[in-house]
Image (tube, rainbow, N blue to C red):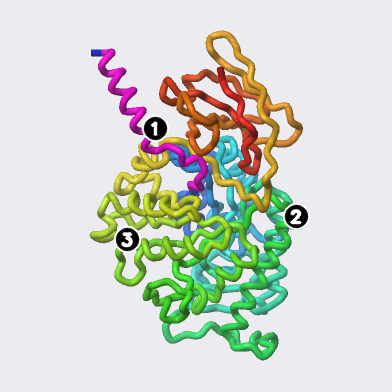
């Protein structure tokens, strides 16, 4: 009976191994929102001990589900989840804007360290233009930028925004990015879909005065787009000057333009578009190389009447212009209608995205919905789609230099020591399994394990699950996800 169970387990493992094989490079991200305490911390003014414990619990849950990148909101409304000389502490952390955590700690430094210890990338998510989330109830510190420079801001609905048409605003936000990139070991700088605000019916965004001064003969729509173009270019330039390895990504609304508005647009009937309503010309930024990746928020189901997921995935796959494209999935929608009660909705979306060579992965909104395992989708990732590890795809235009190959020494008890002898910083080591015969190339290999280590690790073959007849090879993994030449483990 015991032997039969062992044989059955081995058979199941082999089937799972080959069913998930050869997805060695894939971005697997999740957004962790702090505004209104959506994901973390669960409420304002938790003790520092509870804040840390909650974040570790979140990371551990995502690590089990195969996530390899965190998109962490650290500036929801011209505030900070880190000590800043430019902006006050966030009210979503301590309950009162400007109030530091007690006992004092740096939440951002803590989160980066915990994330990197688990081999995940850490992308800082900032909102460029939102300054006060709710003018009726938000806590606003005396040193908040809205009080220091009230002339920079416009109120639209219940939200106070930076005026994107002012050069000093763009310079200020660029300095925020400069400070982050200079002081913290982040892997990416991320902005979502909030450029110019979503329209309020019957109300016009009140930027006429700035347009009269800075319009330079353009139409207002063209001027607004040029303002967004300018801040993107400014941020891209300051990242390149400060730390070239930091990736710059945008997560736009899912529709650039409808085909009825532009022959280049998607076959959709969206009531809002990036280009016409949010004044974000994502395609221009991709074409010009001002951003490194794009994560369109495709929060509709497959076969949606107005915005079909399948149509939009294909459209974005054709319009990434050589930059990385990850699909944003709305796991928060689980159970909200008939389409999203279908447990196959998310799996079908992942499979569809994997059909395109120009789509390099996925991101999920938001963290709490993935952790709570709505529709069993966390289980689906852990047991199926993300059962085997994946390396965040390297960006050749940032770094294509492989690290030195590791040195492998066999130890007693069928264990091995892997050492890195280079002086550069690495993420760790990647172990690949290959069939018993054939070329030792990535085309035929399957990544089975990533060891996070600075320069040395000891392991046994049993730590690297693969069919018994497969050969194992190990490579050094650079901090920018470039692998070295392989060394066979014998």
Disc 3 packing (10 Å; few <14; some 14–19; many ≥20): many
Q: What element carries label 1?
A: helix
Question: Residue 184: x, y in percent?
Answer: 68, 48
Name the residue that disc number 1 marks: 17
Name the residue that disc number 3 marks: 302
Q: Give the range drawn in magenta.
A: 2-28
Q: Is mark 3 on a helix, strand or loop?
A: loop
Question: Residue 135: x, y in percent?
Answer: 52, 72
Disc 1 packing (10 Å; few <14; some 14–19; many ≥20): some
Q: Name the side, left or right, on which 176 lies relative to 53.
A: right
> Is residue 35 in view?
yes
Using the image as rendered, state which of residue 312 and residue 28 is in the foreground. 312
Q: Report the Cα–Cα distance between label 1 and label 2.
A: 42 Å
> Do the CB atoms of the residues marked 2 and 3 lie less than 8 Å apart?
no
* Mark toward the start of the polypeptide (2 vs 3): 2
Q: With respect to residue 275, does 464 lie above or below?
A: above
**Where, by quadrant of the figure, is residue 208 drawn?**
bottom right
Tell us which disc is closer to us: 1 or 2: 1
> Is residue 142 in view?
no
**Where, by quadrant of the figure, is residue 430 drawn?**
top right
Q: Report the Cα–Cα distance between label 1 and label 3.
A: 28 Å
Taking the view exactly as shown, the residue that stands out farthest to the top is: 412
Name the residue that disc number 2 marks: 242
Q: What element carries label 2?
A: helix
């Amino acid at each position: 009976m015991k032997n039969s169970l062992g044989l059955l387990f081995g058979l199941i493992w082999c089937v799972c191994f080959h069913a998930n094989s050869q997805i060695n490079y894939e971005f697997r991200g999740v957004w962790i929102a702090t505004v209104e305490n959506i994901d973390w911390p669960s409420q304002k003014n938790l003790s520092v001990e509870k804040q840390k414990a909650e974040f570790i619990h979140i990371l551990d849950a995502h690590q089990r589900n195969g996530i390899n990148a965190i998109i962490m909101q650290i500036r929801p409304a011209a505030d900070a989840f880190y000590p800043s000389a430019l902006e006050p502490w966030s009210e979503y952390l301590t309950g009162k804007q400007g109030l530091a955590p007690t006992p004092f700690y740096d939440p951002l430094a803590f989160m980066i360290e915990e994330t990197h210890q688990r081999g995940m990338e850490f992308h800082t998510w900032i909102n460029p233009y939102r300054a006060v989330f709710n003018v009726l109830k938000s806590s606003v510190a005396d040193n908040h930028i809205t009080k220091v420079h009230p002339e920079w801001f416009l109120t639209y609905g219940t939200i106070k925004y930076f005026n994107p048409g002012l050069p000093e605003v763009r310079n200020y936000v660029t300095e925020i990015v400069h400070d982050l990139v200079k002081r913290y070991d982040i892997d990416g700088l991320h902005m979502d879909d909030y450029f110019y605000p979503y329209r309020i019916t019957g109300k016009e965004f009140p930027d006429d005065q700035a347009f009269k001064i800075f319009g330079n003969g353009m139409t207002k729509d063209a001027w607004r787009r040029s303002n967004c173009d300018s801040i993107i270019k400014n941020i891209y330039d300051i990242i390149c000057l400060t730390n070239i390895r930091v990736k710059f990504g945008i997560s736009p609304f899912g529709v650039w333009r409808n085909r009825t508005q532009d022959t280049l647009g998607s076959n959709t009937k969206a009531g809002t578009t990036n280009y016409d309503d949010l004044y974000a010309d994502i395609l221009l930024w991709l074409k010009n190389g001002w951003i490194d990746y794009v994560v369109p928020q495709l929060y509709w189901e497959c076969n949606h009447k107005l915005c079909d997921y399948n149509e939009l995935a294909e459209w974005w796959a054709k319009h990434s212009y050589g930059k990385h494209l990850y699909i944003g999935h709305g796991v928060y929608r689980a159970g909200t209608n008939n389409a999203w009660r279908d447990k196959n909705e998310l799996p079908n979306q992942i499979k569809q995205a994997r059909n395109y060579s120009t789509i390099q992965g996925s991101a999920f909104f938001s963290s709490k919905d993935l952790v709570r395992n709505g529709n069993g989708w966390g289980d689906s990732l852990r047991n199926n789609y993300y059962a085997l590890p994946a390396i965040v795809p390297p960006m050749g235009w940032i770094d294509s230099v492989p690290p030195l190959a590791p040195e492998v020494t066999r130890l007693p008890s069928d264990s091995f020591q892997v050492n890195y002898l280079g002086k550069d910083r690495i993420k760790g080591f990647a172990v690949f399994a290959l069939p018993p015969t054939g070329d030792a190339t990535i085309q035929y290999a399957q990544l089975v394990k990533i060891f996070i280590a600075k320069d040395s690790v000891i392991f046994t073959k049993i730590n690297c699950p693969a069919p018994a007849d497969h050969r194992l090879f190990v490579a050094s993994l650079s901090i920018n996800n470039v692998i070295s030449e392989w060394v066979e483990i014998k």
